Amino acid sequence: MNLKALTIGIAGLAFFAAHGDPVDITVSDGKAYTPSWGNTTQKAWWTNTSEDQEVEPRMIANQNWDLEAFMLDGNDLSMVGGFNFQDGYDHGGSHYTAGDVFIDLNGDANSTDIDNAYGYEYAIDINYGAGTYDVVDITTGDVEFDQGTTGPPNNNDDSRPYRITNGGDILTGWSGAIEYSDGSEYGFAGATHYEAGSIDLGFLAGKSFDLHTTLSCGNDMMKGSVSVPEPATLSLLGLSLLSLAGLCLKRKKD
């Protein structure tokens, strides 16, 4: 192998990472089944190992309420689940909808600190009916939140925030259209799947971040995470690659 071939190989890997198959960036929300609840028939829906076939503890457990995955393809974010993102879901005389996507840059997000926007820096403010979204900086101005509905299924406080209703600053150039499709190609369990996608996260390029979304009733919530190496780590990787390239050249000369 020569230096030119090594350089092309590295570039190819970088291109594949940015333009390859969608990557599942979902992380478990850590809500585990507790045997003391006594409901063993739906135990599979209450786990802390996967968001697929999992809703929040004590909530209605079936595919219609299931948020399953955040998928990232380059900068494009999609959400997959048994829940109908576009049309919502009717239950018990009430209509329930999917919420906004919240973005945390420094790991301090929580479900109680409403005075500080729950610790999130950005919200993807989604109008599911119109199929549009805006990226909103929620660290500025007075941001107002919709806390979601109550009643069956009962609102889960740990799932907050649900969505923003006012305030913040829309990032110019980062509004777009939501694309809806059948998400069954990802291989998650359940008979029906929906996908809401093509949310451009290019404004986060080079940053680590955590994601959160939920339903208006809090029946399920979903989290995601992307970790970008620190500059020192990248520098070390670069030095290692240069050393490898030098070794290849030396072997060729020998």
Image: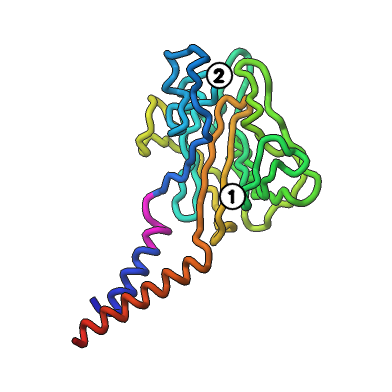
Asked which quadrant contains residue 24, the reply is top left
Q: Give how far across and how far down residue 104 sits, in percent.
A: 62, 48
Mark toward the start of the polypeptide (2 vs 1): 2
Pointer 1: residues within 10 angstroms few (<14), some, or many (20+)?
some
Q: Give how far across and how far down residue 124 sits, in percent.
A: 62, 45
x 39%, y 63%: residue: 15
Asked which quadrant contains residue 3, the reply is bottom left
Q: Give how far across and how far down residue 220 sits, in percent.
A: 55, 28
Q: Amino acid at mark 1?
A: Gly
Q: Is residue 215 magenta?
A: no
Assign the magenta stretch its main secondary structure: helix
Q: Which residues are magenta?
A: 15-21
Residue found at the far bottom of this picture: 253
Disc 1 secondary structure class: strand
**Residue 43 falls left or right of residue 147:** left
Residue found at the far front of this picture: 36
Residue 58, numbered label: 2
